[in-house]
Amino acid sequence: GGSAGDTAKVVILDTGVDKTHDMFPGNKIASEACYSTTVAGQSTAVCTRGSVAAGSGVNCLHPTVNGCSHGTHVAGIVAGNMASPVLRGVAPSSRLIAIQVFSRFDSSANCGSTPVPCVLSYTSDQLAGLQRVYALRNTFAIASVNMSLGGGQFFAPCDSTNAAMKSAIDLLRSARIATAIASGNNGFNGSMSSPGCLSRAIAVGSTLDTANTLSSFSNHSANVRLLAPG
């Protein structure tokens, strides 16, 4: 299971991580995987689904596809360690496990206000990514999984509406691996998005500064466990 401190690995379940970025010097990525899906007439995989080879967790094409820089951005917040100029994430000496769980969509019906093409994530791919994390539990000391994703609006714990995700998070928790999930960026007061609304997830909201001034866009409710500058 996971262990405390910077020596533990952090999983970035997102749009992939640009390993060549200056924020990630040396051998920063400990393991990679791809769970991206092609559905005829809807989505296109951005990597080879099921691959755990080197390169399988790299970022999808940015700026060709909107949203593909997100995973790299998140990874920098977690473990960035740039020498010049000095820019550091929360745990700059930690290493990362990059798992790509997003797919490309080319319709505004799917992308909404985001320009096409965009990337979105199937719950089934997120589940596959979490199963991969569980399979790695004895290979690496894994502290947590970071899921900066989600949608919908929930006023109470949503365990009954997402039983498979709840089971996956519970299994990781039994292995002492925390699952940290964004509360969402809709500005909801008293509600939040899924899957952060699951009872055993650690739902995280955003503050503007260290004085805990809540960001105007951050969802917040009784189910949000932590706030951090974001």
Image (cartoon, rainbow, N blue to C red):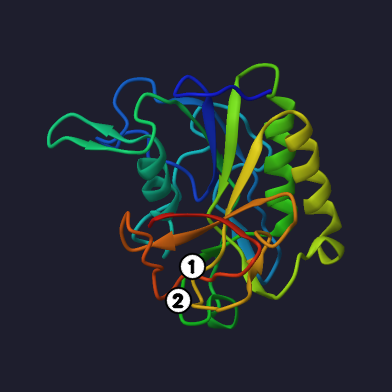
- The kind of residue on which mark 2 rests is Thr
Q: Is residue 28 left or right of residue 188?
A: left
Which image quadrant for residue 221? bottom right
Which image quadrant for residue 123? bottom right
Whether residue 132 is situated above or below residue 61 in the rendered picture: above
Residue drawn at point x = 66 percent, y = 62 percent: 223
Residue drawn at point x = 16 percent, y = 35 percent: 86
Which image quadrant for residue 103? bottom right
Disc 2 + disc 1, Cβ < 8 Å: yes
Nearest the camera: 50 or 100?
A: 100
**Quadrant position of the N terminus in the picture:** top right
Nearest the camera: 6 or 9?
A: 6
Q: How far from the left and from the top, in percent, is residue 25?
A: 29, 26
Q: Is residue 194 left or right of residue 96?
A: right
Residue drawn at point x = 36 percent, y = 66 percent: 213
Nearest the camera: 21 or 61?
A: 21
Residue furthest to the front: 211
- Mark 1 closeness class: few <14, some 14–19, many ≥20 residues within 10 Å: many
**Quadrant position of the C terminus in the picture:** bottom left
Q: How far from the left and from the top, in percent, is residue 60?
A: 45, 50
Q: How far from the left and from the top, in percent, is residue 134?
A: 73, 31
The label shown at residue 118 is 1
Give the residue pinned by disc 2. 114
Q: How far from the left and from the top, in percent, is residue 80?
A: 32, 36
